[in-house]
Amino acid sequence: MTKLTETQTIILNAGTQRPEKIALPLPKGLGGAAAKMAVTKMIEHGWLQEVDANVRRNEPLWCETGDGHGTTLVVTEAGLLAIGIEPVVVKTRVASYGVANAEPELKHPTLRTGTKQALLISILQRPQGVSMQEIVAATGWQAHSARGALSGALGKKLGLVVVSAKEDARGRVSRIGQPA
């Protein structure tokens, strides 16, 4: 498996947060030849795909085709897998009255071992829990990044319940557990 660069990871993560998984705009400071090279590599790996831009919805343009139309960049399923997100599989079923409904089958992202996120989950699973200072020391993240990982990556994306309680000796201690 090809290792992603920091720039590629940022582009793919940002694209997953946008409607239609559009990877534009690119990160600030990435432009010109560097942007073209980064995007070309990502298209070669199958992580991004050029698609016709919908100008009525003001989708950002990657490339103009010269006839008043253009293309935009979309994160592919391979791009999702590259950053550790399992694509949602859409299952179509026919209702009793004959109309097809799309019903997504929820799949939780697979967790890659050896990552800081995996380390965070393992220390949150300890019976004694973990304080913010301990998370910062273990991961090397700043406190605001650790808080974001607790609520965003673990809580919203992975669906884990992170509970915290104030302890006299250690301050606020977090654990993965059941909601109160």
Image (spheres, rainbow, N blue to C red):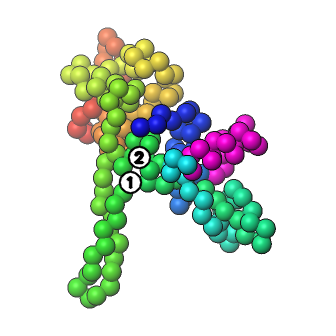
Residue 164 percent across, percent down from the top left: 32, 29
State yes or no: residue 111 in magenta. Answer: no
Whether residue 64 is visible: yes
Residue 135 percent across, percent down from the top left: 39, 20
| Prevailing SS of the magenta stretch | helix
Dot 1 crowding, Cα within 10 Å, few <14, some 14–19, many 20+: some
Q: Is 59 drawn above or below residue 116 in the view shown?
A: below
SS for tag 2?
helix
In screen coordinates, is 11 left or right of 86? right
Magenta residues, start to end: 24-43
Q: Quadrant of the N terminus?
A: top left
In the rendered structure, find residue 87 and report the number of the disc placed on it: 1
Residue linked to disc 2: 81
SS for tag 1?
loop
Residue pictured at 69% horizontal, 56% vertical = 62
State yes or no: residue 36 in magenta. Answer: yes
Q: Of all residues shown, which one is farthest toward the bottom? A: 97
Whether residue 17 is visible: no
Residues at marks 1 and 2, CA–CA distance in whole angstroms:
7 Å
Q: Is 112 drawn above or below residue 54 in the view shown?
A: above
Tag count in the figure? 2
Q: Of all residues shown, which one is farthest toward the front? A: 44
Is the C-beta separation of discs 1 and 2 under 8 Å?
A: yes
In screen coordinates, is 64 left or right of 123? right
Dot 1 or dot 2: first in sequence order is: 2
In the rendered structure, find residue 153 and report the number of the disc placed on it: none
Residue 82 percent across, percent down from the top left: 44, 43
The amino acid marked with disc number 1 is Pro
Q: Is 80 drawn above or below residue 92 in the view shown?
A: above
The foreground one among 46 and 76 is: 46
